Image: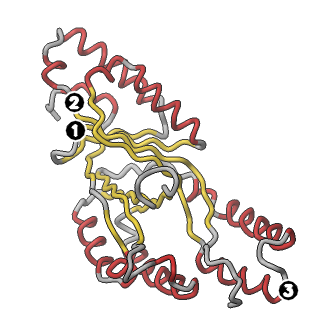
Amino acid sequence: MAENTPAVPLTIEGAYALHQMFRIRRNAWRALESQKAGSIAQAASDWLTHQSKTALYSQIGHKGDLMLLHFRDSLAEVHRAELALAELELADYLEPVHSYVSVVELGLYESTAKTYAQLAERGLEPHSPEWNAAIEEVLARQQTAMASRLYPEIPPARFLCFYPMDRKRGEEKNWYTVPLAERQRMMHEHGLIGRRYAGCVKQIITGSIGFDDWEWGVDLFADDPLVFKKLIYEMRFDEVSAVYALFGSFYLGERIAPEKLGDLMLARL
């Protein structure tokens, strides 16, 4: 590949995502009269029931009690969902402990290499108007072909595992200085592992560069939570993870129906 070929792989983006983690102020909640608590929980449950792209999880472990996952078609819509939740009286009994903002992202490493090579053969200068027009045409085709993956429904699986991650940028190992073709090879091999688990886990990758503290977010959905351990453990032995990956905190939750919100508030699931 020519020396002046861009090092940045092409990506296509879709729905925006917001993860919200809360601690329930249970002392204050239990101090409410049962009728008042029931009314607050019902109002929040009704709101959740009408949010087809919001899912509620009972968080497992000390990092929080309740986790909400929102998918929306734009960042503004994600923000409106956040504000609508804050407007509910229930919010007075929830203490935010963490959140994460990102956008569904599909990396096009293989398409990038082919496209760049084809444009070079045509003699197009990188970032020239002709080059940019050709790139936009490729991205538009990919957007159409991948629409269902870019704007996914939240999988109905019982368990969710979410974690953020980076690629190393240190003195010894720096993902961003590795040639594009080499990164393409490693990502291809990395993806083969995930495909072996396709029947038992659903994965959604979101990009967060410029949006939050890490570079990507990973959501894994499965009915058997043990698959999270097996998949992530196997991937740790893969070159792209073993050499270049850094992982943030992991958040685990069990999905609950909106009508069970009142039980969750009282830890009675």
x 39%, y 44%: residue: 19
Q: Quadrant of the C terminus?
A: top left
Q: Amino acid at mark 2?
A: Ile
Q: Please tell me which residue lies in front, 243 or 226.
A: 243
x and y percentages locating residue 259 in the rendered image: 31, 28
Q: Nearer the viewer, mark 3 or mark 1?
A: 3
In this figure, which residue is indicated by the disc labeled 3? 123
| CB atoms of marks 2 and 3 within 8 Å | no
In this figure, which residue is indicated by the disc labeled 1? 65
Disc 1 is placed on an element classified as: loop
Disc 2 is placed on an element classified as: strand
Q: Nearer the viewer, mark 2 or mark 3?
A: 3
x and y percentages locating residue 43 in the rendered image: 37, 18
**Residue 100 sits above or below residue 133 on the image:** above
Mark 3, Cα crowd under 10 Å, few <14 / some 14-19 / many 20+, is few
Q: Amino acid at mark 3?
A: Gly
173 left or right, relative to 223: right
x and y percentages locating residue 193 in the rendered image: 39, 79
> Rounded to the nearest whole Å, what is the CA distance between mark 2 and mark 3?
61 Å
x 57%, y 87%: residue: 181
> Rounded to the nearest whole Å, what is the CA distance between mark 3 and mark 1?
57 Å
In this figure, which residue is indicated by the disc labeled 2? 24
**Residue 82 sits above or below residue 127 on the image:** above
Q: Amino acid at mark 1?
A: Asp
Disc 3 is placed on an element classified as: loop
| CB atoms of marks 2 and 1 within 8 Å | yes
x 58%, y 56%: residue: 150
Which of pointers 2 and 1 lies earlier in the amino acid sequence? 2
**Residue 75 sits above or below residue 202 on the image:** above
Q: Quadrant of the N terminus?
A: bottom right
